[in-house]
Amino acid sequence: MTPDDDHKEKYTNLKKRIRDIERQNDFLHIRVHKAQKSIRRLRLERTFLLDRIEKINGQLSFDDSEDEVLATSDQDTPLNYHHGSQQKTPKPKKKKDPNAPKGPGNVFFLFCRLQRDKIKDEHPEERSLGEVTKLLSAKWKGLSKEEKQVYQDMYQKELEEYEEAMKSYTSGMAGTMNTNPVQEDDPMNVSVPVSPAI
């Protein structure tokens, strides 16, 4: 075996090892992204449930504690006077239901989703997401109208599927909002007798 053959073998082994490490890295990035996504979803669910609990507690104790709140609010809260500047009240964010179907994005995102692996294989030196997206953008701009039409048709199909899923989701939400069945095993459903207003 010549030194050149030995170097070539080492080179191919190192190249394989680099590819394996990159695959593992991509896999870990995906797992981290999924974990972050599930954390966001769980936080959203938590705020949704806390708001639901507050509404239930607020409806039950509104009649009883209205006078108490008015009497104690003057004593407990200090007065803050700000001269010359007004404090901006933060706008409440619109809460998204984590169970709602996700939209298809746009045609370019569909193209990126389908072509990302090919670009990574063609350009293994490009590792960051931004660099790969730049290459995808350049490839997208180079496509003819006929080639883009293929992705446009795929996007339309995904959009129709999304609209059908949203219809079934919203009709399912309307059905659950009206019936509101009480489940015995659910600790969040607490039935409290309400006395009639006097």
Image (tube, rainbow, N blue to C red):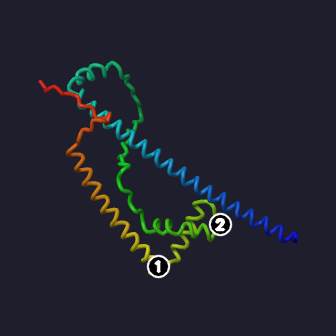
* Mark positioned earlier in the residue sequence (1 or 2): 2
Which quarter of the rendered picture does the C terminus lie within? Answer: top left
User: Residue tagged by mark 1?
Assistant: 147
Count neighbours of disc 1 (C-alpha within 10 A) and say few if under 14, some if 14 to 19, many if 20 or more.
few
Q: Percent position (x, y) of residue 111?
A: 48, 69
Amino acid type at circle 1 is Glu
Q: Are marks 1 and 2 in contact (CB under 8 Å)?
A: no
Tell me what residue is drawn at x 42 percent, y 62 percent.
Answer: 105
In the depicted structure, whether residue 68 falls above or below residue 42: above
Residue 53 tag number: none
Amino acid type at circle 2 is Pro
User: Residue tagged by mark 2?
Assistant: 124
- Residue 60 occupies which quadrant of the picture? top left
Q: Secondary structure at mark 2?
A: loop
Q: Nearer the viewer, mark 1 or mark 2?
A: 2
Q: Nearer the viewer, residue 49 or 132?
A: 49
Q: Secondary structure at mark 1?
A: helix
Tell me what residue is drawn at x 57 percent, y 70 percent.
Answer: 118
Q: Nearer the viewer, residue 116 or 130?
A: 116
Which quarter of the rendered picture does the N terminus lie within? Answer: bottom right
Q: Is residue 67 left or right of residue 87?
A: left
